Image (tube, rainbow, N blue to C red):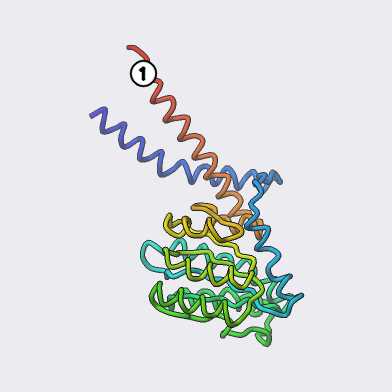
Amino acid sequence: MAQLIAQIGLIFVALTLPIAMWWFSLSLRRRGRSPQLRSLAAFDALRGQLGRSVESGRPAHISVGTGGLAGGEALMTLAGVSIVNSLAQESADTGAQPTVTVADGTALILAQDMLRRPYTRRGDLTGYTALNVQQLGMQPLQYAVGAADFLSSAHPVSNAMIGSFGPEVALMVDAGARQGLAQVAGSADARALAVLHTSADHVLMGEEIFAAGAYLDRRPGDLARLRAQDLTRLILIIVILVAALSALLPG
C-alpha cells in the first residue's frame, strides 16, 4: 500500500511540478526579472536573414521540414512554423517575404496563416502573397529533391531548415552549400543531426528548436516556459541524486 501511495505521489509531482514552475517563472517575468538566455549563434543568424534579403533583393528560404501537424512529427513541425511566425512581422514591415517550403498540407495552411497575420492586424493584405509558401512534395525524399532543386534554381539569400527531417536532408544541405548559402538548421532527429553537423553553419539540437519564441520574440510565456524547464530539470536531478545517495547509505 505504501509503495502504491509513493508511486501516486511521484506521478502527481511529475505532472504538477512543470506547471508550478511555469507559473513561478511567469510571475518573476511580470516583476521584471527576465531570465538570462545563453547565446545561440543559430538564432542570431536567423535574425539577420530578412535584412540580407532586403539588401540583396533575393528571398530567404525557410523549410519547416517533412512533417505535418499529426503524429510524432507535429512538435518539430510546429517548431519550424514558429520560426516563420517570429519572422513574419519583420517580413511585413520590410516587404521581404521569405519563401517557405513544406511537405504536408497542414503545415502549408499554418505557415500561410503565420505570414498573413501581420497584414491582417493592419487591415491590409496588399503585400501578402500566399504563393510564398510552397508544397514541394508529399514524401520526405520527394520534398528533399524539390527543395534541393529550389535552392539551386531560385538562388535564395540564405537557407534555414528547422523541423522534422531524416537523412534525406543531406540533399538540401548539399544544394545550399553548393550555392554558398548561409545555412541554419535544427532538428530533434539524430539521423538528420548527424548530417547537418557536417555541413550547416549553425545547428540547433533537440529541444533548442523549441526556443524560437523566447529567443526571437522574447515572449513572456515562452521565456517563462524555458525557465520552468530548467528549474524542473534541476529539481529532478537533485531528487535523483538524493535518492541514489539514500540507497547507498547504510541503514
Q: In which quadrant of the rendered image does the C terminus lie?
A: top left
Q: Quadrant of residue 130?
A: bottom right
Which structural element holds mark 1? helix
Give the answer, above or below, for where 92 lies relative to 230.
below
- Name of the residue lying farthest toward the top: 251
Q: Residue at x 48, y 44 (%)?
A: 18
- Name of the residue lying farthest toward the front: 178
Give the x, y percent position of residue 190.
43, 54
Q: Residue at x 37, y 61 (%)?
A: 72
Count all numbered tags in the image, as a single digit. Answer: 1
Give the x, y percent position of residue 46.
65, 63
Q: Quadrant of residue 131?
A: bottom right
Q: Residue at x 60, y 76 (%)?
A: 115
Give the x, y percent position of residue 219.
64, 57
Give the x, y percent position of residue 246.
38, 20
- Name of the residue lying farthest toward the right: 55
For this view, does 116 lie left or right of residue 139? Answer: right
For this view, does 248 lie left or right of residue 205? Answer: left
Q: In which quadrant of the rendered image does the N terminus lie?
A: top left
The residue at which mark 1 appears reads as 248
Give the answer, above or below, for where 201 lies relative to 178.
above
Indicate the amino acid at tag 1. Leu
Give the answer, above or below, for where 214 lies relative to 48.
above
